[in-house]
Amino acid sequence: MWRALASELQRLAAAVGMSKLLVVDGQQRLTTLTLLLAALRDHLTETGDAESAEGIHAQYLANVYDKGKPAKVLPTQADREAYKAVLTRSPDAGGPDRIGVAYNHFRAKIAAADDPDDPHDLEEIEHAVVHGLAVVVVTAEPGDNAHRIFESLNNTGLQLNQSDLLKNYLFMRLGERGEDVYDTVWLPLEKKLTSDQLELLFWLDLAQRDERAKQSETYAGQQKRLEKLAGPEQIESEVRRIAALGDLLATILDPSREPDPAIRLRLERIRAWGSTTAYPVVMALLARRAAGTATSTQVAAALLTLESYFVRRIVVGRATAGLNRSLLQAVGAVTDAPAVDVALRDYLSRGRRHFATDAQIRGAVGVVAFYWQGRAAQKKLILHWIEGSHGSKEAVDPTRLTIEHVLPQVPTDAARREFAAGLPEDADVRAEHERVVHTLGNLTLTGYNSELSNRPFSAKRSMLADSGLHMNRGVAASETWSVAEIDARGAALAERTIQLWPGPNEGLSGGSDEEPSATRRLVASIVAEIPAGRWTSYGEVALVAGSYPQPVAAIITHLMQGVWRVLQTGGTISPGFRWLDPARTEEPRAYLEAEGLRFDAEGRADTELFVDAAELASLVGLEVPDEAPAWRASDTRPLLAHWQAFFQKVRDLGESTDAVVRYWPSPSTQDAVDVNVGVPGCVVVLSLSSRDPSGVQCSFYVRDDKALFRAVARTL
C-alpha cells in the first residue's frame, strides 16, 4: 500500500511542486493511516527490525532530509501536539487523547498479530494494507468552491461542515502566523462553539452584509469575500473579528453568560422561541453595545420589541408571513441608528410587516384560531409567559405543561349540551363551537391534559380550581363555559398581551383599519395562485391564511382573480356562486372545464387536480402549521373517496330498509350529508371526522319549529 501511496504522492508532487496542500476531505483517514504506520514502525523497532522501521519513517512519516519542514501529514491544530509526540517517538506518546487512543489501539493489534515463529506475518499485514488502498487526489484551483466539489464527490456520505472548510482556508492563508493565532484566538472560540454553531456564526456574519445570503452557501459567500483580503495581517484581523462575533453568538446560545438581567431575560426568551432568523438582528444589537454605541437599556428595549413582534404576529394569525425577510432586513435598520430601540420599533412598524396594533390584538382574539398559529412550542411559551406575569409564588415546571382546550375539541354529548345551553335557541351549535374552540380565550395550560380530555366543563372545573396556575383558577371561577365566557376571557387575555408586549408605532403602522384589508389581500394573493385547470377548497385556503373556512368563504365573495377555482370540500361548485361581474353570464362549470378541470357525472371535480394546503402555501411563499387543525384532514384526497364510499353504503342500506325516509341523497365526497326524515323540518346529519375517518357523528336537527324542538328535547 505504502509504495503505491508514495508513488501517487510523488506524482502529485511533480504536478504541484511540493506545495503545501489543504485537505478538504480525508483528514481523518490520512491521520489514521499515518498513526497505523507509526505503530507498525515502533513495533518493528522494538522487535529488532530497525531497517524496516526506518524505511517506513523516512518514506511516509517525516521529511528526514529537510529538517525545516513539518511532518508529511499534519492534522488539525487541536490534535497536533499529541500527533507530533507519536511521530517523534516522544516518551509521552500514546496519551489518553484521541490520537493516543488510536495509536495504542494499533500497537495492541499489531502486537497480538505478530507471531515470533512466523517471520512473514507483519509483511502480510503490510501487504494487505498496500493492496487494499487506492488514493484519489482532486486538487482545487484558486476560486474553486471546494464545498461544492466535495458535495459532488460525496453525495452519498456525510455532509461536510462548511465551518471546517472556512477554518482551514483561513489558516492556510495565515502561513507562519497560524500556530499563534490558533492558540490565542481560534482555540478559545472552538471551546465556546461547536462545529455546527461555527457554521451558523459564519452565516450570521454574511447575513449582516447581505439579507439574501443562504446558509447552504456560507462557504462560497465567505470565500468570495475573503479572497479580497491581501496578506496574513488582514486575514489575522478577520479571524479576530470573527472570534469577537463568536463571543456574541455564544451569549445568544447560552444567555447565562449575559451579566445584564434585563437583556439576559430577553435572550432566554428568544432562545426558547427557536427562530434562528432572529439571530442576525440580535447579534447586531449586541455588537452595538460591545462597540459602546448602544446602552444596555436600549438593547433590552429593542429585544423586548422583537419579542413583542413575535408574540403579536402569532395572536393575529401572521406567524410566518414575510418573517424571515423582515428580520434580515432589520439588521440594516439598527446598524447605524442613533437609538437602536427606537430604530427597530419604527422599522417593524412600517409597511406590511404585520406588527399587530392594539386594536388588531383585540379584534383577533375572538376569531383567530390561536391554537393553529405558529409552532406548538411558541404558543405554549406565550401562555406560559402570560401565566408568569401574574407573579405566582408557586413554582410550576413548564416542561410538564401542555395546551388544554377548556371547551373540548371533540366534545362529548354532555359537553355539547353544556355548551349549547349558553347559546340562543336558534344558534348553530356546531358553527359556534368551531368558531371559538381554538381561540385564545378557550386555551390554557395544564399538567393533566389526558385526565381532563373531552370532559364537560362541570367535570373539569374542580380540577382547574385546584391547579397551581393562576389562569386555571380564573377559568374555574366561571360557573359555565360557553361563548360568552370564552369571548370574555379572550378579551382579558388580549389586554394582558397588550400590557406585556408593547406594540408598534401606530403613527407609522397605519392604525387599526389595516387588518381587515390585510386579511382580504392575503386571501386574494392565495386564491390568485391556484393554477388554471386545478381546484382547491375553502378549507385549504383558510389553512394557508391562518383562518377558518367560514370567514374565508365570506371574504372571497369579493372580486378576486381565480375565485371560481375555490370549490366546496367535495369538489362541487357552491350553489350560491355568482359572478360579481354582471357582464359574465357563462356557467362556472363550463368555464372551469374550458380551463382544463374535469368533473364526473355527479358534478364533482377530479381529485387528482386538487391543490392541497401544502402545495398552495408553496405557491404563495407561506407556511402551514406542522399539525393540521381538527376540521381539516392531513390529506384530503384519500378522504374524498373514503367519504363517497361511506355515503354510498348509507344510501344502499337506507333504500333497502327505510320506511320513514322518502329520499336518500346521492353519494357525496363532502364530510357530511343531510337526510330528511318523515316529519317535516326534521333532518339527520351524518358526519365523518376529518381527524379520525373511522368516526361517524349523527346529529338531529329541528328547523324552524321551536315547539317541536322543545318537545323532542324533553324526551332526551
Image (cartoon, rainbow, N blue to C red):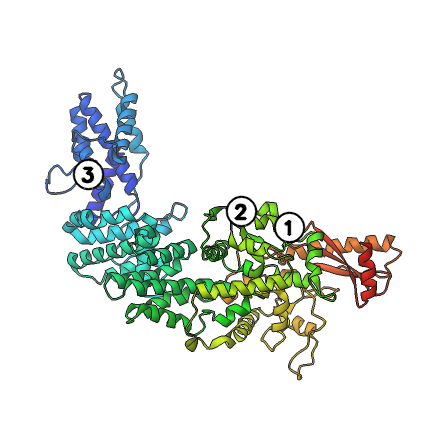
Q: Position of residue 83 (x, y in %)?
A: 21, 37
Q: Residue at x 41, y 57 (%)?
A: 275
Quadrant placement of the N terminus: top left
Disc 1 secondary structure class: loop
Q: Which mark is residue 81?
A: 3
Q: CA distance from mark 3 to mark 1?
A: 64 Å
Q: Which mark is residue 454?
A: 1
Q: Considering only order in the chain, which callout, 1 or 3, is on the residue closer to the N terminus?
A: 3
Residue count near mark 3 (Cα–Cα under 10 Å), binned few <14, some 14–19, many ≥20: some
Residue count near mark 1 (Cα–Cα under 10 Å), binned few <14, some 14–19, many ≥20: many
Q: Considering only order in the chain, which callout, 1 or 2, is on the residue closer to the N terminus?
A: 2
Query: What kind of residue is marked 1?
Result: Asn
Q: Is residue 235 above or below residue 580?
A: above
Q: Position of residue 554 (x, y in %)?
A: 63, 72
Q: CA distance from mark 3 to mark 2?
A: 53 Å
Left/right of residue 374 with respect to residue 451 in the rendered view: left
Q: Residue furthest right?
A: 659
Q: Is residue 15 above or below residue 39?
A: below
Q: Is residue 647 visible?
A: yes
Q: Residue beneath label 2, please?
A: 447
Q: Residue at x 75, y 60 (%)?
A: 673
Is the residue under label 1 in contact with that under label 2 (CB below 8 Å)? no
Left/right of residue 517 with respect to residue 247 in the rendered view: right
Quadrant placement of the C terminus: bottom right
Q: Residue furthest bottom?
A: 583
Query: What kind of residue is marked 3?
Result: Glu
Disc 2 secondary structure class: loop
Query: What kind of residue is marked 2?
Result: Gly
Disc 3 secondary structure class: helix
